[in-house]
Image: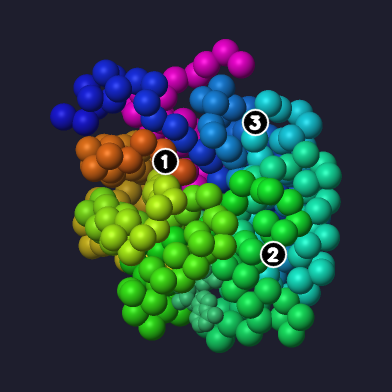
Amino acid sequence: QHLPLFAEARGDIQVSFEFFPPKTEKMAETLWDSVQTLAPLQPRFVSVTYGAGGSTRERTHQTVERILKETSLTPAAHLTCVGASKGEVDDVAREYWDLGVRNIVALRGDPPEPGSKYQPHPHGYRDAAELVEGLKKVAPFDISVAAYPECHPDSSSRRFDLENLKRKVDAGADRAISQFFFSADCFLRFRDEAAAAGIDAEIVPGILPVSNVATTRRFAQTCGAAIPQWLDDLFEGLDDLPAARQLIAATVAAELCGQLYAGGIRHFHFYTLNRAELSYAICHLLGVRAKQS
Ligand code: FAD
């Protein structure tokens, strides 16, 4: 019943899109085509990730600057605490503010060696909550933080993870964006638990349209997201049929969004992987249509 519902509900859904900074000219072209394809859907913001250990600092900055100067979109720059002192992080934030960037996605980041224990920089922000507090002192940014419906792997318990999210919101975060997940029930339960724990900021589901389960499994290993067996089964036998995989990816993601919509969700954040088609198709299924800017 979800699709007719979306047709009626047209207009009450908002979306945002996440991109990563391109490494090559060719990747830059793909990214830019995607930004332009998705722009008419008038997302609330489009965010640009920050590579592990700050490795993409320049490229993140360039991408954010280009979006700001050449489109009417609202860019959100991801920023992490890894490998930088508080002063260095504050300088990056101040540069963004002076450029006209008002939205930041504030993250702790991961250790440079996958699997090793996170060690804060000796003069750096210890975690995302401290970073949020520091950023709010630099300027009145709109700040998003990360949330984990299936619990962050570093968390000793679900309760500790929720307390950590509360610390980020109490420090001034305006909303949380979730890690990807494949069970609407799991997300909605997490949202309700967060509300019960006194977290009053909006929690936006992060939607990863999956057209390649093997790649998704690699992402999922480090971030505490479960890949259900049914997802594996759905893609079985389709290794050589990329177009069929795309169609299935759109169907699965739209179904997930439908269940979330029924649970009251009205903002969806898409991990685009710099490709527009899937996210565009899913938005279309949700009744999100191109608007004249
Ligand atoms: P935090 O909220 O600081 O903490 C994560 C966990 O660590 C907590 O749940 C808690 O269990 C534990 N913890 C925190 N503080 C303490 C403490 N003081 N003592 C003990 N335990 C503590 N990574 C990138 O490198 N670049 C990106 O651009 C990027 N974008 C992301 C966007 C989204 C929407 C999401 C969900 C994740 C993103 N990540 C990115 C990944 C993120 O950096 C990792 O998941 C990282 O491991 C945790 O970051 P956080 O901001 O959630 O950390």
Amino acid type shown at disc 3: Leu
Q: Mark 3 Cα within 10 Å, few/some/many (few <14, many 20+)?
A: some
Q: Name the image quarter holding residue 130.
A: bottom right
Q: Of marks 2 and 3, which one's residue comes earlier in the chain?
A: 3
- Residue at which label 1 appears: 268
What is the x, y in percent for residue 233? Answer: 23, 56
Q: SS for tag 1?
A: strand
Nearer to us: label 2 or label 3: 2
What is the x, y in percent for residue 157? Answer: 34, 79
Q: Is residue 285 magenta?
A: yes
Residue at the spot 58% in from the left edge and 68% down from the top edge: 128
Give the tally of numbered discs. Answer: 3
Q: Is mark 3 within 8 Å of ligand 1?
A: no
Residue 97's place in the image compared with 168, above or below, is: above
Between 64 and 145, the one lying in front of the other is 145
Q: SS for tag 2?
A: helix
Q: Which residues are magenta?
A: 270-293
Q: Of marks 1 and 3, which one's residue comes earlier in the chain?
A: 3
What is the x, y in percent for residue 152? Answer: 42, 72
Query: Residue 52 vs residue 198: left or right?
Result: right
Pointers 2 and 3 in contact (C-beta within 8 Å): no
Q: Is mark 1 within 8 Å of ligand 1?
A: no
What is the x, y in percent for residue 183? Answer: 26, 55
Residue at the spot 50% in from the left edge and 59% down from the top edge: 169
Amino acid type shown at disc 1: Phe
Residue 134's place in the image compared with 37, above or below, is: below
Q: Is residue 125 magenta?
A: no
Distance of mark 2 from mark 1, alpha carbons?
27 Å
Residue at the spot 37% in from the left edge and 26% down from the top edge: 12
- Residue at which label 3 appears: 73
